[in-house]
Amino acid sequence: MSSSQAQDRLPDHVRNDIYAALLSGSGIRNIEDTLNHQMQATGFKATLKAYVNHLLRVEGVATFPEIMAKVEAKVLHDTQAAKNKDAANGVNGVNGHSSEGDDYNLALPTSVSKEGAKAVLKELDKVCDITAEEK
């Protein structure tokens, strides 16, 4: 498959074949392990747990859908704020410090996405042929 074909949406049967291949081996598990390790190593998981506890104990959020909505919104907000701040400062990544007194910085660390992408590519390389067109 060429890179231009890969940029188009994959047909359902091809995507399903890739998922089946990843699920039949250790591909999905390896990707999960990589992401889990990176989130643990950067402190993201500990901060996420503390934020969920805060939602339950302090803010009185009572249902799983409410927690998920608040967590998703916070991750998106904090990650975008970190990107904007880093772009303005000419810096890449997240330094792990809280911003503006917020005790729960849920900006997704750059290493999580970088290492996650590497893991996905490594596992995809095992189940399909990925080639890039030279320009």
Image (tube, rainbow, N blue to C red):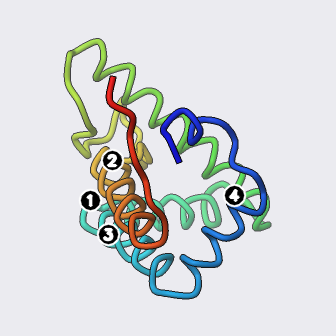
Which type of secondary structure does the marked residue at label 1 adopt? Answer: loop
**Three-letter code for the amino acid on which mark 1 is drawn:** Thr
- The crowding category of the residue bearing disc 4, from other C-alpha atoms within 10 Å (few below 14, some 14 to 19, many at least 20), is few
Q: How many marks?
A: 4
**Given contact means CB atoms under 8 Å apart, are the residues at marks 2 and 1 in contact?**
yes
According to the picture, the residue beneath numbered tag 4 turns out to be: 68
Task: Estimate how packed mark 2 is, as few (under 14), some (14 to 19) or many (20 or more) residues with alpha carbons within 10 Å.
Answer: some
Foreground: 107 or 18? 18
Q: Seen in the image, is 87 located left or right of residue 26?
A: left
The answer to whether the residues at label 3 and label 1 have Cβ atoms under 8 Å apart is: yes
Residue at position x 43%, y 27% from top? 81
Could you say which quadrant of the image residue 37 lies in?
Answer: bottom left
Disc 3, SS: helix
Q: Residue at x 65, y 65 (%)?
A: 56
Q: Earlier in the sequence, mark 3 or mark 4?
A: 3
Q: CA distance from mark 3 to mark 1?
A: 6 Å
Residue in the foreground of this view, choosing between 132 and 80: 132
SS category of the residue bearing label 4:
helix
Residue 10 against residue 49 in the figure, above or below: above
Q: Which residue is mark 2?
A: 109
Q: Position of residue 109 (x, y in %)?
A: 33, 47
User: Which residue is disc 1 drawn over?
Assistant: 42
Residue linked to disc 3: 40
Q: Amino acid at mark 4?
A: Met
Q: Looking at the rendering, in which quadrant would you find the C terminus?
A: top left
At a point 30% along the width and 62% down the height, the residue shown is 43
Asked if marks 4 and 2 touch (Cβ < 8 Å), the reply is no
How far apart are labels 4 and 2 at the CA level?
19 Å
